[in-house]
Image (cartoon, rainbow, N blue to C red):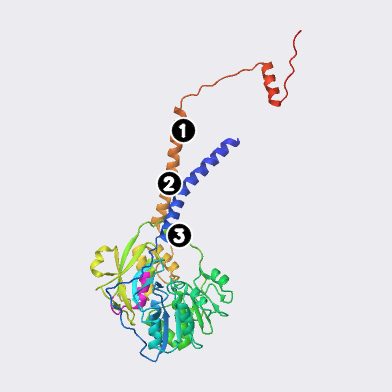
Amino acid sequence: MFCPRFCRAFRIAMLVFAFLVPPALAGIVTLYTRMQGAEALDPAARGDVPTPAPRPPTTQRRLAVIVAGNRGTEITDSLPLIELLEASGAFEVRVVAPRRILSPFKSSGFASAALDFFPDLGFDDYDRLVGRTPDLVVVPYIMAWQNEDAAVVPWIRAHVGPHTTLMSICAGAELAAATGLFEGHRATGDYALIDRLTDQYPGIQYERDVRWVRDGNRISSGTLTAGLDATLAAIDTLAGRDAALRAAAATSYRQVQFLDDPRAPVSVSLVGPALELAYRWERSRVAVVIGDGVAESAVAALVDAYAATLTTDAVTVSMFDGPITTRHGLRLLARGTTTELHRYDSIAFATADHPGVSSYDAAITEVARSHGRPMARVAGRLINYPTSHLDVGGGIPVGVTMILRAVLLGLAGVGMLLLWRRSRSRSLVNAPARPTVSLRLGRSAGAYLASSASGRMPVIAARR
């Protein structure tokens, strides 16, 4: 009775195991490849492109400085903030880096954003041409702040005065904490770093589940697009609510509710994103077309939204092989030209006009069009951008194609198991019979062997 039940349960367990293992292995390998396959940031040094002259501030408006690195600066942490601050009408913005050389942006996909920029000022330029303490210093995520760009730490310390507001964005919280200028303040940061930051900097009180935190003249944001909300909070603090709302309206940014209530619980469920990324094996290349006068947020949104899919390489292209100037004066250099558009799988226009639609809304919608709504939700989740107001919600958390691929892998595993069992059964049936030896022992011989095994030899009495 026990053996048939056990055998039946064992067979079922083997079938379940065969169904689950192939898709699990394929998914793990795909996810590992996506995370490890990020392109290393190159120095973006092109000798054929002359370095533009320094661009010091020209007005008496409040001066906002965005600190950048020469080896990689996260694009959403920095580029769209220029547009928000300038659109408020209260700030003049300059990007300042250790050296005024061509420098790369980093994307949310752990790789190069395939876009370079010229800082407005090097550190030496700033001290020589500006000569005043900034009203606002913004610290984005700078990849090499602990080595090649280590000069940013003492520069921030030296240029944050008693009346300067210091704002960290996303993973820039670690750099800001290293300056010591957040000591004794409340703050937040990239949600994945908060545990480590709490242990490393016990003098800073880190908060979770918020888009931004303001404590005196210290402001900090959560992951990536939460920096947009922190920037509006900085405008509100330094220039008033009207200026903040003016900036939001000018950029069609709709999430102004976070000005009054920055609370936003972070969803920890990654089941949908993991499944979507685990079985999307295609990798595509999209050309992001930029040109003179392009909105800074339009470029950053498309580059980061596509990078967040972890399946798409977004490469910026322009009409000519030379620097272009954004709407508010930053000089960018694309990695390609429009003469090479035939080499890409699709084209996205950062220059496209979307009246009444924010750049990040347009970018998420574009990802939904090209990759499907589940992948658009993945991109929104990874760049921390609310998508509930967009037509990408609802339905199953992963694309039907991805589910079918996982199921087919499972069925293939079951089929292989059944074929193996069938071939094994045939080999057992067709195997030649093995010769057997039958040994019959007499009663006295059996007793002798039994006693030998027990260590007691029988006493054999001789017959007289």
Q: In the orientation shown, which residue stands out farthest toward the top? A: 464
The residue under label 2 is 411
* Amino acid beneath label 3: Ala
* Amino acid beneath label 2: Leu
Q: Is residue 88 visible?
A: no
Q: Where is residue 246 shown, x and y percent of the image?
A: 40, 85
- Asked if disc 1 and disc 2 are in contact, CB closer than 8 Å, the reply is no
Q: Is residue 346 magenta?
A: no
Q: Where is residue 32 shown, x and y percent of the image?
A: 44, 57
Give residue 425's mark.
1
Looking at the image, is mark 2 or mark 3 nearer the viewer? 3
State the SS at label 1. Answer: helix
- The quadrant where residue 357 appears: bottom left
**Magenta residues: mostly which secondary structure?**
helix
- The quadrant where residue 313 appears: bottom left
Residue 169 vertical placement versus 418 (above, below): below
What is the magenta range? 291-303
* Amino acid beneath label 1: Ser
Q: Where is residue 398 shown, x and y percent of the image?
A: 43, 59
Q: In the image, is 205 to the left or to the right of 222?
A: right
Q: Where is residue 378 shown, x and y percent of the image?
A: 43, 64
Give the residue at x 54% y 84%. 216
Distance from disc 1 to disc 2, alpha carbons, whole Å, reads 21 Å
